[in-house]
């Protein structure tokens, strides 16, 4: 799915840039004849190489007290979100998610800076995970 | 019975009311100020021998349309207090109905700009930490007594309306500032380079309208030590007037007072602001020290709350413009008792120094190399100075780094010429993030971000990953049980 997303944005850049040059800057059209295909080739290479690396760096763990997740190829980020801080959980399915039977789950806290997004979860598991998170939230806040 | 149910039972009903009749006019002034530049451009762009009928129509018709919309908006706007909630209905085409439970309101701010003072009204802004960037409810024009009455309803004492800061009460202010203090706050707050930029722009403007005013003035100064001193003195006076004057205008009459669990503050000469904030909604205390303030052993303090206010660099109603460094602990003990006295900060590992030097000198080299190459030999001197300056700034930035934790409180300091010390309680942590860039990993470092409700996170930059992991262990298991 990440490969197709990369291809989509790369193709959009190549075609959109070419169209813009053709419509508004005629002198750049010839330049785009060279750079457009170059962008497409770079996109194809990126789509082949990058997603497996991104995927291999993604991990999450449902812990006793908190959700832990790690991601980032160059810039590593490791987040911890205590269950007691969960405000709500969103599940979203984009067109490509639906094509591959996947979903994206996002946990919200009172801070907009919280980084707790789980992409590429199997759609069937996402709902179970959401209920599990809400159950953990209830247990963590019991007696408060 | 929940707190909200109890408040709903105890709070009397305030029947539906409209804003002050001056509200449409104040709204019109605001809208016209926003449209001033586009309107002026529309008049002068494409002008041939004179203004076209369309331009006249736009210039005269638009204010009429805006005034009409403002009037309709005023007619459809109403507020009331019922069932323990502030209820606001608004909207001409799209109707909007908002209910904010009084129990959740934690920030009420009263603002009186010049146009408000002209009509003897105030603007009341009400927040419950609902996540919107501005105030959740803004009542643009209320008579002073009406504003006091509504505040009294929202503060749970409907029969005793009074001013936000009552000079007759025995409550001692936590902090206040006279004109002299405010002038020092202004002079030490504005970066000197920015002031030179503003003065330069003013002189350029004066040149445009006054036939080389600046050039002619400077040319008349004799090339002597006295003449040089006079020019420097004139700049110093301009700097004090501009920076000090701005601070006095913004903060005149500043007072921060505590009454029970509430913080009450007021400030402003032309635009007056008064605010009431629940103390338990305070998330972060930030101390701001410029290089001049460090030399004078003073600092300013900003208070970040759940509504997200006070976290930014700009002027906030929740800030103390200037206080002595020796008085910080006293103020912190009032605002966040658990953080007082502030623990001594732990220095960061020497590899953090290496990382900062490498980062700053690489940038200086990238800027300096082309200069050195293109304008030899002067360019080489400029590039050398750039690198020396980068090294000095790197050393200052490293020395600013420090953090400490004690009794459930995190204190972290970072910055360069302008240092910021953030103090927060771990109980405010919504989540934590440990980040590392390739350069940080090379130096064996990482940065920790503690995310608080709304506003900026508290960061501990360039520390040993092991230390940061220990910090998280101290914080999160305790958090999870709460």
Image (tube, helix red, strand yellow):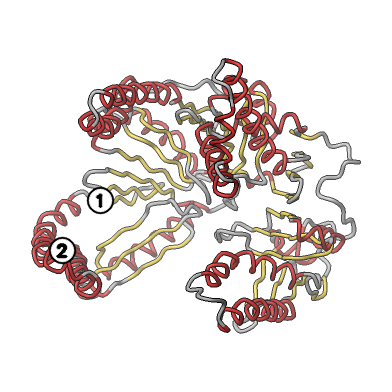
> To which quarter of the image does residue B246 belong?
top right
Q: Earlier in the sequence, mark 2 or mark 1?
A: 2
Quadrant housing residue B313: top right
Towards the viewer: B113 or B454: B113
Count of all numbered marks drawn on residues in the image: 2
The local secondary structure at tag 2 comes to helix
Q: Position of residue B482 (x, y in %)?
A: 53, 46
Mark 2 and mark 1 residues within 8 Å of each other at the beta carbon? no
Quarter of the image where one finds residue B24 = bottom right
Query: Depth-wise, is mark 2 or mark 1 nearer the camera?
Result: 2
Residue B225 in view in this figure: yes
Q: Say which residue label 2 marks.
A: A3
Q: Which of B138 and B190 is in front in this view?
A: B190
Which chain does the numbered disc 1 sit on? A
- Residue corresponding to mark 1: A59
Q: Calculate the distance from the C-alpha at mark 2 to the C-alpha at mark 1.
A: 19 Å
Q: Nearer the viewer, residue B313 or B41?
A: B41
Residue drawn where x is 47% and y is 73% of the image: B46
Disc 2 crowd, CA 10 A, few/some/many (<14, 14-19, 20+): some
């Amino acid at each position: 799915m990440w490969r197709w997303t990369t291809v989509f944005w790369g193709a959009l850049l190549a075609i959109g840039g070419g169209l813009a040059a053709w419509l508004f800057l005629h002198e750049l059209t010839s330049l785009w004849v060279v750079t457009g295909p170059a962008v497409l080739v770079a996109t194809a290479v990126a789509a082949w190489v990058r997603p497996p690396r991104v995927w291999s760096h993604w991990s999450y763990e449902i812990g006793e007290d908190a959700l832990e997740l790690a991601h980032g190829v160059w810039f590593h980020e490791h987040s911890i979100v205590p269950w007691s801080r969960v405000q709500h959980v969103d599940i979203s399915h984009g067109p490509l998610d639906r094509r591959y039977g996947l979903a994206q789950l996002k946990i919200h806290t009172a801070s907009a800076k919280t980084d707790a997004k789980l992409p590429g979860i199997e759609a069937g598991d996402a709902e179970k995970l959401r209920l599990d998170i809400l159950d953990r939230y209830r247990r963590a806040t019991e007696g408060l | 019975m929940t707190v909200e149910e109890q408040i709903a039972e105890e709070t009397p009903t305030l029947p539906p009311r409209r804003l002050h009749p001056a509200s449409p006019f104040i709204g019109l002034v605001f809208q016209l100020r926003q449209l001033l530049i586009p309107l002026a451009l529309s008049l002068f762009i494409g002008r041939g021998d004179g203004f076209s009928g369309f331009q006249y129509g736009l210039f005269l018709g638009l204010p009429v349309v805006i005034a009409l919309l403002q009037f309709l908006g005023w007619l459809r706007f109403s507020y009331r207090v019922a069932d323990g909630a502030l209820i606001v209905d608004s909207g001409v085409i799209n109707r909007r109905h908002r209910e904010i439970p009084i129990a959740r309101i934690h920030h009420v701010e009263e603002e009186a700009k010049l146009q408000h003072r002209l009509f003897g009204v105030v603007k009341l802004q009400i927040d419950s930490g609902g996540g919107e960037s501005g105030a959740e409810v803004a009542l643009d024009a209320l008579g002073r007594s009406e504003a006091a009455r509504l505040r009294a309803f929202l503060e749970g004492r409907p029969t005793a309306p009074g001013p936000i800061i009552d000079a007759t009460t025995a409550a001692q202010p936590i902090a206040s500032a006279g004109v002299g203090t405010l002038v020092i706050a202004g002079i030490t707050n504005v970066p000197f380079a920015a002031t030179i930029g503003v003065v330069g722009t003013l002189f350029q403007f004066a040149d445009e309208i006054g036939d080389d005013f600046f050039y002619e003035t400077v040319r008349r100064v004799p090339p002597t030590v006295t003449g040089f001193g006079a020019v420097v003195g004139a700049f110093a006076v301009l700097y004090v007037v501009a920076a000090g004057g701005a601070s006095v205008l913004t903060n005149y009459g500043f007072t921060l007072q505590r009454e029970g669990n509430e913080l009450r503050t007021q400030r402003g000469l032309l635009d007056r602001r008064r605010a009431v904030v629940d103390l338990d909604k305070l998330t972060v205390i930030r101390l701001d020290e410029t290089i001049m303030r460090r030399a004078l052993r003073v600092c300013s303090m900003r208070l970040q709350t759940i509504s997200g206010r006070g976290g930014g660099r700009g002027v906030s109603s929740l800030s103390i413009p200037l206080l002595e460094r020796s008085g910080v602990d006293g103020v912190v003990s009032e605002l966040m008792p658990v953080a007082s006295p502030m623990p001594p900060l732990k220095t960061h590992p020497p590899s953090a120094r290496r990382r900062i030097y490498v980062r700053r000198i690489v940038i200086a080299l990238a800027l300096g190399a082309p200069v050195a190459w293109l304008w030899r030999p002067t360019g080489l001197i400029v590039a050398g100075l750039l690198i020396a300056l980068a090294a000095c700034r790197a050393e200052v930035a490293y020395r600013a780094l420090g953090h400490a934790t004690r009794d459930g409180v995190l204190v972290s300091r970072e910055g360069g010429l302008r240092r910021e010390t953030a103090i927060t309680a771990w109980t405010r942590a919504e989540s934590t993030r440990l980040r590392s860039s390739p350069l940080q990993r090379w130096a064996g470092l990482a940065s920790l971000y503690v995310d608080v409700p709304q506003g900026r996170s508290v960061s501990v930059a360039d520390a040993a990953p092991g230390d940061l992991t220990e910090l998280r262990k101290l914080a999160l298991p305790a958090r999870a049980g709460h």
